[in-house]
Image (cartoon, grey):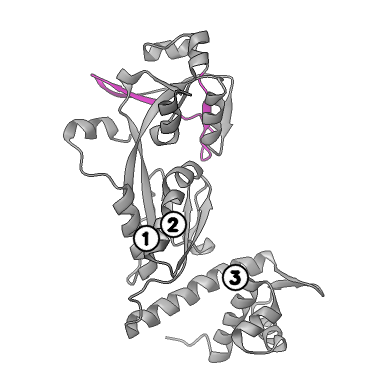
Amino acid sequence: MQRNFDDLLLGSIELFCLAAELGSFTLAANAASVTPAAVSRSVGRLEERLGVRLFVRTTRQIRLTDAGQRYFEQCRQALSQLVDAQREVTGQQTTPAGVLRISMPTPYGHYRVLPLLAAFRERFPRVQVETHLSNRNIDFADEGFDLAIRGRAPEDSSLIARKLEDAELVVVATPSYLKRAGVPESVDDLRSHECIQFELPSSGRNLTWTFADESGEFDVSTNGSYRTSGDALAGITLARSGAGLFQTYRFLVEEDLREGRLVEVLRKYGGRSRPFILLYPHARHLSSRVRVFVDFLLEQLAQPPQNPAQQRLTRVQ
């Protein structure tokens, strides 16, 4: 195997990451017990080797360039893996530690994962959790994430997929809307109702509503004057204002249903769900902080095996 890095270069990468994290050559120098000039020289060596500027420097501050930000994310992940490898070999990885980065959809993050993080850190106080809430698909290699939660398993065979749960769907509206427009008794009645639309970010198409009856499962295209995209919570806000009907996850509107702000309709066509999948790259030596976080989420969120009738209703097409 060809040698690509010497001790000086690895030290320069470490000092670069410190400066990027702390936003200051002086603070990085203090943390590493070297001089600010040494940090500046190390960054200069990297920039000369790479042929790009890593920082924009002014008399008062430094900030990463776009290229510097990409390089920092990759280097931080690589250095973290080196530390994990050292701890595993020397037996020091008994206590999980370090930064764990996870990407997840906005609604699922707010309602399912973020409320659990304080309990997780009580168990593992040396693990720092960075969360990224967005519905877009992320690139593990380019963006330095350890884990992601998505609504479907990817085709990418390099990723491990673990189902967290099948989240039940419900159709809801305010009592005032139902008094004004009437309560739908069948799926066909949706044609005469204002159905709030959610646009899929991947295709730009409106998400179909999904139901089940004694004959099986089926999807329905609905119509409405309100269209939202990017964040399903916007559809719930519209529904709370009396704008119309909206199909969403039960866990997002449980409190609204309990308090009577929203009412569930079309119950006899309910029971359908969509999955939430935990994704992470295949790794021969998975870091302990990732392992314990995966186990924690599965413990808190994963559902027990279902009977065949429930499986029929929750199968995702």
Q: Over which residues does the magenta segment extend? A: 195-218
Q: Which mark is residue 293?
A: 1
Which amino acid does the dot numbered 1 rest on?
Phe
- The CA distance from mark 1 to mark 3 is 26 Å
Q: In which quarter of the image is residue 85?
A: bottom left
Which amino acid does the dot numbered 2 rest on?
Ala
Q: Position of residue 122 (x, y in %)?
A: 40, 62
| Nearest to the observer: residue 172 or residue 312 | 172
First in sequence: mark 1 or mark 3?
3
Q: Circle 1 — which element?
A: helix
Q: Which residue lies furthest to the front in this view?
A: 259
- Circle 2 sits on which residue? 118
- Circle 3 sits on which residue? 71
Label 1 environment density (alpha carbons within 10 Å; few <14, some 14–19, many ≥20): many
First in sequence: mark 1 or mark 2?
2
Q: Circle 3 — which element?
A: helix
Which part of the image, by quadrant, shows the C terminus?
top left
Which amino acid does the dot numbered 3 rest on?
Tyr
Q: Can residue 249 be seen in this view?
A: no
- The CA distance from mark 2 to mark 3 is 31 Å
